[in-house]
Amino acid sequence: MHVRRKLVAGNWKMNGTRAALGEIAAIAAAARETAGVDVALCPPFTLIPLAAPRAGGVAIGGQDCHQSPSGAHTGNVSAAMLVEAGAKLVIVGHSERRADQHEEDSLVRAKAEAALAAGLQTIVCVGEVEEERIAGSHVDKVLYQLEHSLPELAREAELVVAYEPVWAIGTGRTATPADAAEMHAAIRAALVARFGDAGERIRILYGGSCNGANAAELFKVDQVDGGLVGGASLTAAQFVPIIEAAARS
Ligand code: 13P
């Protein structure tokens, strides 16, 4: 039986200016009072160096990195640059980047490898679209993404998988506990088949309209090791109850 410490990570997406730094300080203050759960926040790149010194035990991260260490890649940021800015983690392969920037599994894998090599905890996102769930191919789709997006070496201490059904992101619709249980069990089995015992230690987060009202139920599901939270991570008022739910579960 492996006990994995819960992780609650906020993804601010393209939200947040200096005016939001007070929320980060308030989240950090509440997280300090909440034992037994790891907390992370991924604001826009521009806020990372400002947020990191205010974040206390909350790890600050990026929402993407380039797969190369440097070079002629206008508009991109490398993993080492994130580290220098104060980041401890990074999200790669988010479905919004897979859709908006046409990122494919092989690119996500290259980014994950670059991030891990730079010493960043790395959250690799996977998730099916609604048509795939309706067709019943959701598990196959996610396992395919996982197989091709994860790096070769698990480095289980630093690798995290986030299951985010695309139809649940920003829609107010959440996976049911049964939906989450089915997918998280399938992901766990795939991780163990690939990485052996290390696969037991990789945390699997749920993401998609997670909020203070549904977090407790989701975090009780077997193999759900925490959450990746978008909209409800933008304010301490909404994010702190999710952190507390993780600490209680
Ligand atoms: P919401 O929590 O806003 O649905 O976003 C989830 C997400 O995409 C986190 O990465």
Image (cartoon, helix red, strand yellow):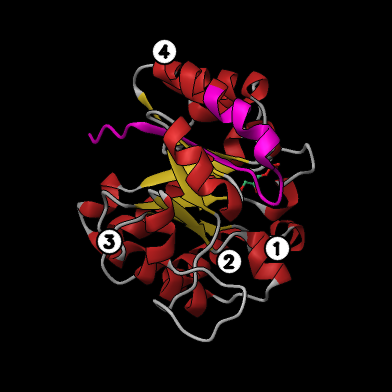
- Marks 1 and 3: in contact by CB < 8 Å? no
What type is the residue that disc 2 sits on?
Lys
Question: Which class describes the residues within 10 Å of circle 4: few (<14), some (14-19), or many (20+)?
Answer: few
Determine whether 55 is above or below 121 in the image. Answer: above
Callout 3 secondary element: loop
The x and y percentages for residue 100 are: 73, 69
Distance between the alpha carbons at the discs numbered 2 and 4: 39 Å
Frontmost of labels 2 and 4 is 4
Distance between the alpha carbons at the discs numbered 3 and 1: 27 Å
- Marks 2 and 1: in contact by CB < 8 Å? yes
Q: Which residue is mark 3?
A: 154
What type is the residue that disc 3 sits on?
Ala
Which sits earlier in the primary sequence, circle 4 or circle 1? Answer: 4
Distance between the alpha carbons at the discs numbered 1 and 2: 8 Å
The x and y percentages for residue 85 are: 43, 53
Q: Which residue is mark 4?
A: 33
Highlighted range, magenta: 1-25
Question: Which class describes the residues within 10 Å of circle 2: few (<14), some (14-19), or many (20+)?
Answer: some
What type is the residue that disc 4 sits on?
Glu
Distance between the alpha carbons at the discs numbered 4 and 3: 32 Å
